[in-house]
Amino acid sequence: MAQPVSTRGVRQIPSFGFSNAYLMDLDGQGMALIDTGTRGKTQKVLDYVASIGRKPGDVAYIILTHPDADHSGSAAALKRAMGAKLAIGRLDAPRLSGEKKLKEIGGMMLLLGVFMRVERVKPDLELKEGSTIGPLTIIDTPGHTDGSISIYKPGDAIFVGDLLRGGGTGGLQLASPTMSRDMEEVKRSVEKISKLEFQMLLPGHGKPIEEGAADKLRKFVASGFR
């Protein structure tokens, strides 16, 4: 099995289950945790932080690409454990806090909701297009959810949540149609980020692309998303 990403200041938390979570160095401003996995991942994250010689308080921000339970399930517990500021796209903030329900798209989402409970928590920061956290810039990339965001370090890396999935051979797939609110909007968001420059593309599920990711994404768009 390939080793998780650990380059360019990005560390993929290993053995994390079916969704990905990453730590990103913020150029001297601590670290950001990108997504938190399902509920019950808190100790795994804390153990990994310790294994790289860091302390929970070194994680200054927890940034969620969207509020689905497999990405936000441990957010509340990790916020308490780390003392980090919790951030999410502004249109998804009410779903994280419990002011609105998590999305329900068919019976599968309802079933997942039973097994992946999310502790509601109010975010400290509601992010929008152009918001910045250290060297990271927020890109609005809706479609999978209303407020899905991508997190971009110019010229270097982009974290895309469930906008795209990584294939086992290093390819790309669009967000799952059965789990997404609007697939045409997903495609528009993918086209949007394909105009950016980056080496690494870090998806919420599947294998990251560690080199030449922007070129691969542009070819994927040009092929009609195939």
Image: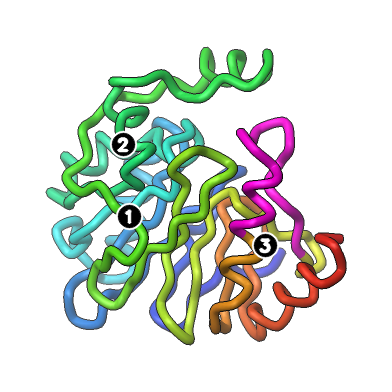
Name the quadrant containing residue 172.
Answer: bottom right
Q: Nearer the viewer, residue 151 or 211?
A: 151
Point out residue 169 in the picture as x, y percentages from the top left corner.
81, 67
Q: Nearer the viewer, mark 1 or mark 2?
A: 1
Q: Is residue 216 above or below residue 109?
A: below
What amino acid type is highlighted by mark number 1? Lys
10 Å neighbourhood of mark 1: few (<14), some, or many (≥20)? some
Q: Please tell me whether mark 2 sits on a helix, a strand or a loop.
A: helix
- The residue sitting at 33% across, 53% down in the picture is 63
Judge from the rendering whether residue 205 lies leftward or rightward of residue 88; answer left or right: right
* 183 vs 45: above or below: above
Circles 2, 3 touching at the beta carbon (< 8 Å): no
Indicate the secondary structure of the residue bearing disc 3. loop
Pointer 1 or 2: first along the chain: 2
Q: Is residue 124 above or below residue 218?
A: above
Write down the region rendered in magenta.
172-189
Which numbered mark, 2 or 3, is in the foreground of this view?
A: 2
Kind of residue indicated by mark 3: Lys
Residue 93: mark in rendering: 2
Please say if the residues under marks 3 and 1 sit with CB atoms less than 8 Å apart.
no
Is residue 91 shown left or right of residue 115? left
The residue type indicated by label 2 comes to Ala
Discs 3/1, front: 1
